[in-house]
Image (tube, rainbow, N blue to C red):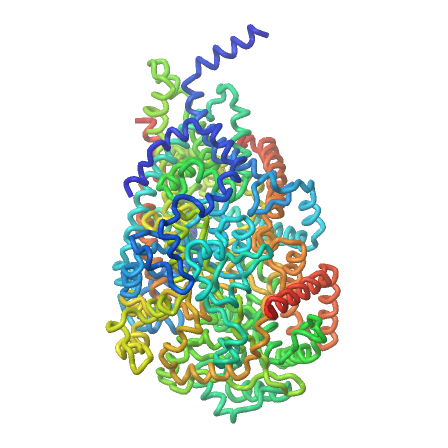
Amino acid sequence: MKRNLLKPGLTLVLATSLALGMAACSNSSSESSPTPQPTDSTQPPSEVKLNPEEPAWKLDTSPVDLTWFVGANWYGQTWGDSLASKYVTEKTGVNIKLEVPSGEANEHVTLMMTSGKLPDLISMGSWENAVKKLWEGDHVYALNELADQYDPYFFKVAGEGSLKWYRQENGNTYGVPNDSYSPTLMHETGMTAANQTFLVRKDLYEEMGSPDLSTPEGFLNALQLLKDKYPEYKGQPISPFFAQGNVPYGMTEFLQNLLAVPHEQDGKVYDRVTDPDYIAWLKTFRTAYERGLINVDFLVDSDTQVEEKTNNARYFMMVREWNGMAAVNPMLAASANPDSYYIAVDGPKNSKGDAPKLFPGNMDGWMVTMISKSTKNPERAIRFLTYLASEEGQRDLFLGKEGETWEMVGDKPQLKPEMVDLQENDIEKMEKQYGILDTYWMMRNPVIINQWRPAKAPVLKQMEDFANERADIDSGIYKGLDPQGDSDVAVSWARIAQNWEEVMPELITAKNEAEFDKVFDNFLDRRSSYGFDKVMEHRQTELDARKAKMAE
Amino acid sequence: MERRRRFRHIGLFEVCNTLLMLAVCFLTLYPMWFVFVNSLNSPQQASLGTVNWFPKELSLASYSVVFNDKTMMNGFYITTLRTVVGTATHVLFTAIVAYGLSKSNLIGRKAYMKIALITMLFSGGLIPSFILMTKLGLYDNFWVFIIPSMYTFFNMVIFMSFFRTIPDSLEESAKVDGASDYGVLFRIVLPNSMAVIATISLFSAVYHWNDYYQGVIYIRSQNLLPLQTMLYKIIAENSMSFMQQQAMAQFGARLPGNSIKFASMMVATLPILVVYPFIQRYLVKGVMIGAIKG
Amino acid sequence: MFQYRTGQMKALLKQWQLQSMVIPGIIWMFIFCYIPMFWLIIAFMDYSIAKPLFDSPFVGLKHFQDFLSDERFWRSIRNTLGMSSIKLILGFPIPILFALLLNEIRSLRFKRTVQTISYLPHFIAWTIFGGIALNWLGEGGVINQLMMAIGVQEREILFNSEPKYFWWITFFTDTLKETGWSAIIYIAAISGIDPGLYEAAELDGANRWQRMWHITIQSIRPTIAILFILAVSGILGSNFEQIFMLKNNMNMRMAESLDLYIYNMGLVSGRHSFSTAVLFARSIVALGLLFLANSTAKKLTGDSIF
């Protein structure tokens, strides 16, 4: 603290900074040039002993500090206070200092890049622009090169699939994902990590006689019944409908998946927005609005308003990922109206009545973890990541220490009952004191840890099963084909997507079908003037590239 | 007769004005009241949504969470420190510059004013500032709160226009007595400018207290984070991109509850609120003139 | 020539104390404003954060052409001007009026209490304040209940879903939040007025309104002028946090201000050059407006910033 307050030389810098300051602008780049290659004196003498069958972290367990940037500003865990983190530090000698941005992770990393000083380890959302920039700007190590040099065991545990998935054109892989699901694996285990569901409030739905919601007619009839008989239910006003992430997600991609709108036709990327079934359903929503059966609250409510309505079970039906209900549903089931929780049922379907084709988990996963070139200890960093990716590391962080938080039951490790109890009743204490389960998820590998997960409450299981059954395992490859970043085609797409967000409400509130058609046609015209062809081309190229990677 | 009519007229005005002020009070007090009652709501009730007038279940649970949070208390310390140091340096530095610029015989005054003016309108943006701070050694350094905010054009102009209203005769007489420019500034001008000093101090103190942005951008060490940056983190779900929110829900992360949010806000806001009544004594009619007369 | 120079040098040396007050300020501005300003050059480049500055190619006015030919840019200009005009024309006098009326309150304690309470909302972040406003404007909110009670409307309106209300919502919420705060500067200015002036006026038989007009307003006129000039030069700006909180897909076409446009079309996708180009253009316009407002004010009232 004190040292920071009285940083020596600062006044001097200020007094003489004219020239220096000038350099600040023009020289910014030289600072960010790549730091020394790993082939320097840091190389341990024990290098000869490297064995691809044996994790290398055991070779050196002397204490070392690594900073780890976690790109999620809400992440509030610390390292070193909880049992699991202490255990890992004792074992490997690696002490972690977790760093969390106060603002947006993407912005933060972008700025750090310009200054050339990055934390040792960086985990951030795989979709963020900054990830690509880190790779292009040579700010992070190629993990395969580090592994070759310091810990070949890495290749054994990192998963050939995800290494290949993130391999760049130059043949290097710069990051490892967490929560990444490969199709083969999903087929094998039946665990698809699918989240998308169509939910209704159970007691209300059943009291209404479990109406059909899968056809436009049934949907409208149910809404009419709701309006006539249940504008209020059990003392609360009811909002008929909600779609998560409203226009760009819930009413577009998500709804299209419920309607099983194809992603591809005859090897060509399909323009899903123009699908007749999808349009028919948008028109159904328009009709519902015209008849006063739904309001536009689902298009304008703020997150806080949505949360409030959800927590009070004020929505009748929702196009929503079930994970978002993980805290709410048990709470509702324990409330004064124990049947007011949400269940997954068949929602809107296409005219052929096909089952939904929901997104499964995919290869991208959630966050990618990288080792920055600013680190002084690349060899300890790669060994630590290898350890965390291995079954042993996964177990140590997910379950904690044998005998204290888990024990062997038969040949399977199992959490102690008091831990399971803690997870249900005081999850904060569990995280702070024990740091197990999902406390440190940066390197979480679902394939390994899901076998140890305690069973879910029935009110959650029902939704999860629904999603798993209807997941289209092979459709993970279609997720996020749209161009991102600052390229011309990405700008075109941003323009189109942002325009669509404004057009959708106009469609739903259109006075009649003719106006609906007019608004929609105008959108299509505008879309092509913004350069939609290029976007389609980009999607196609991206899809072909992904297929090639999968086929390897 | 004439007098009585005027009296009645004034009475009506007085009543209306008082009523208007009461209405203003009601409208402007409500938002703070809203935060206050919601901070007292029990966490279970708070999860069901906000309340408008009174807590459904009175509870101090959220406050005990906030006060037991060591990092929050450290943030409190940083914020207080930067507010005190930052306000003092800002007022001093800006006042001196403004005094110099308020003199019409200052050689190069026009050029200086133009230079100052441009700074208000043009800025290179975040990236070059970030690079600059890094080069100056201000990144992740307490002084990043102080030095870059030592001056603002707006406050400089306020100071300057105020200094110009001080009668020249006052300064002249001091000069005749042999005082230097600095002597005049510190012994005559500043003591007679308490109203404007109080106002600018208030602006600066409130800025320093409320500013979260410097902390978001330039601070990496947990122990240098100001309170407001932490608060920003707690209440800024809205600034999260949809992908982030979705990922959060999907992978089972949790956010602090509603009542904690509001309790943190109360704790972070109350101390600065007392500054104003303290400063108000300098905003009483005639402070400056009275001082000059005396 | 030489003579002239030495004369100037002498004069400069004579006022070295005054100069030494100003020059540190100029140095400060140079370091913290002018050095970063150099970066505006990326408005003419295709800058990529992954590369050193001068590895990026110069593209001339490409980014300027880009936004000037974008209909959405012009829409955002319209919205910004709309919201700013309301704020300037209707909003600018409100804190002055408030300060004047407050000044008429006789009880010192009541005056101070009102003053303190009125500036409270300034301390509530827009994320929270906006949330309260949305509650008021939404289903079952105060406004709807009020309107239905007095019979102005028959059924609930989601005010925030109607684009036509958006400018007014921003105006009213901003007024509610910032009036007390903005009034402080006027209250301070009023406190500088010599009480003797009022006494003299009262002896001359001036009534309340005459005193308010001839003494109070005339005395704080320079302050008003300065703030007005600054407000005029800022009409292409907007309160980003406020708009970000209140906007949604349905009111977007009236809500997207220039700031929001820069955010949506530039910053979100990391287009630094594009954003800088828009900002640069805006600064130039603001500079022009500032000179215009300043010289107009100088002519009309004799008050000005420079």
The picture places residue A103, in percent across and down from the top left corner, at 44, 54
Left or right: C79 as drawn, with respect to B259: right
- Name the image quarter holding residue A10: top left
Left or right: A64 as drawn, with respect to A15: left
The tally of labels here is: 0
The picture places residue A294, in percent across and down from the top left corner, at 58, 79
Q: Nearer the viewer, residue C47 or C191?
A: C47
Residue at the extreme front: A48
Considering only vertical position in the picture, is A114 above or below A234? above
Considering only vertical position in the picture, is A476 above or below B20? below
Q: Does residue C225 appear in the picture of this structure? A: no
Left or right: B211 as drawn, with respect to A539: left
Residue at the extreme bottom: A209
Residue at the extreme top: C3
The picture places residue C284, in percent across and down from the top left corner, at 62, 39
- The quadrant of the rendering that contains the C terminus of chain B is top left
Considering only vertical position in the picture, is A506 above or below C114? below
- Name the image quarter holding residue A440: bottom left
Q: Nearer the viewer, residue C8 or C101?
A: C8
The residue that appears at 51% across and 91% down in the rendered structure is: A208
Q: Nearer the viewer, residue C54 or C111?
A: C54
The residue that appears at 60% across and 76% down in the rendered structure is: A255
Q: Nearer the viewer, residue B229 or C92?
A: B229
The picture places residue B102, in percent across and down from the top left corner, at 46, 26
Left or right: A409 as drawn, with respect to C236: left
The residue that appears at 45% across and 31% down in the rendered structure is: C28
Q: Does residue A495 appear in the picture of this structure? A: yes
